Image (cartoon, rainbow, N blue to C red):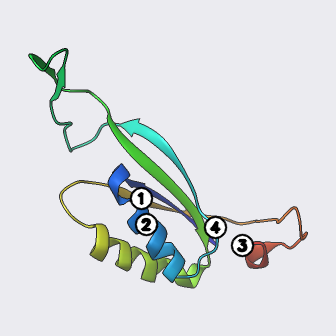
Amino acid sequence: MKKLEIIIPDRRLHDVSEILKVANTGGMSYYRIEGRGRIKAEAVAVGRGTMHYRPEFIPRYKVEVVVKDEQVDGLIKTFVERLGDNIGGKIFVIDIPIAVDLTTKKTGEDAI
């Protein structure tokens, strides 16, 4: 099993959700984060629009999903095709040695 951590702009959350639904991956979790990287934030107007400043951190979403090993390559390919543009984002793949479903008591891939 692998955990995919997908960091995306907030406007791409629906696209990620749809990709995961089509791939029949089960559940996903997401939360709002802020960070900085190569992409710089756009200037924001403040006050009555007379002043502008460039925020240091850019708002993003982090999506986490645990998938079977054989799904990883296909999902990454789909994400790169559908989300790969100049607005940034990252995918991190982490090995998950153990998973346990507390309700059904299933373990391993059966738990996801």
| Quarter of the figure that contains the N terminus | bottom right
Q: Could you tell which of marks 2 and 3 lies nearer the N-terminus?
A: 2
Q: Could you tell which of marks 4 and 2 lies nearer the N-terminus?
A: 2
Specify the amino acid type for callout 3: Ile
Local SS, label 3: loop
Q: Residues within 10 Å of mark 1 (few under 14, many from 20)?
A: some
**Image marks 2 and 1: residues in contact by CB distance under 8 Å:** yes
| Quarter of the figure that contains the C terminus | bottom right
Q: Which residue is mark 4?
A: 27
Residue 54 x, y percent position in the rendering: 18, 26
**Image marks 4 and 3: residues in contact by CB distance under 8 Å:** no
- Which residue is located at x 19 percent, y 14 percent? 47
For discs 3 and 1, the disc positioned in front in the rendered view? 1
Q: Nearer the viewer, residue 112 or 38?
A: 112
Q: Which residue is mark 1?
A: 13
Specify the amino acid type for callout 2: Val
Q: Which residue is mark 2?
A: 16
* Tally of numbered tags: 4
Specify the amino acid type for callout 1: Leu
Q: Could you tell which of marks 4 and 3 lies nearer the N-terminus?
A: 4
Specify the amino acid type for callout 4: Gly
- Which residue is located at x 21 percent, y 44 percent? 38
CA gap, disc 2 to disc 1? Answer: 5 Å
Q: Which residue is mark 3?
A: 112
